Image (cartoon, rainbow, N blue to C red):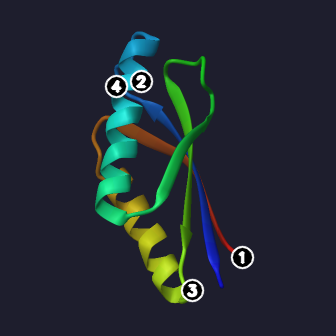
Amino acid sequence: MPVGICHIEFEINGAMSLKDKRRVVKSIKDRIRNRFNVSVAEIGDLDRWQRAEIGIACISNDAAYIDGQMASVIRMMETDGRINLIDVSTEIV
């Protein structure tokens, strides 16, 4: 049973407060959850208002499916004009 894990670090364009950051991160997390049916959580840079880190987990009986899901999530985030991706790492265990 393969499990996919993805760690994404990004900066938030135009965030001037933690409230701005929370609004953007919550929106991104909700879109990822609803569109891809994966688990997602904010895992780092909690007090920095211009940067965020999220972790995504997906489980399936097919590693290729997991790889496709993670690639789709990354593509969606790359096209979001509110953020700039800094670092992305994906692992299938």
What numbered label is drawn on residue 22? 2
**Mark pair 1, 2: CA separation:** 30 Å
- Of helix, strand and loop, which one carries label 4? helix
Say if 38 sits above or below 71 in the image. above
- Of helix, strand and loop, which one carries label 2? helix
User: According to the image, label 3 marks what residue?
Assistant: 63
Measured from the top left, where is residue 79 in percent x and y? 29, 52
Q: Residues within 10 Å of mark 2 (few under 14, many from 20)?
A: some
| Point 53% across, 89% down: residue | 62
| Point 53% across, 68% down: residue | 58
User: According to the image, label 4 marks what residue?
Assistant: 23
Tell me, yes or no, whether the two marked residues, 4 and 2, touch with CB atoms within 8 Å: yes
| Point 48% across, 68% down: residue | 70
What numbered label is drawn on residue 93? 1
Dividing the picture into quadrants, the one containing residue 1 is bottom right
Amino acid at circle 3: Ala
Say if 77 sits above or below 57 in the image. above
- Of helix, strand and loop, which one carries label 3? helix
Measured from the top left, where is residue 52 in percent x and y? 54, 33
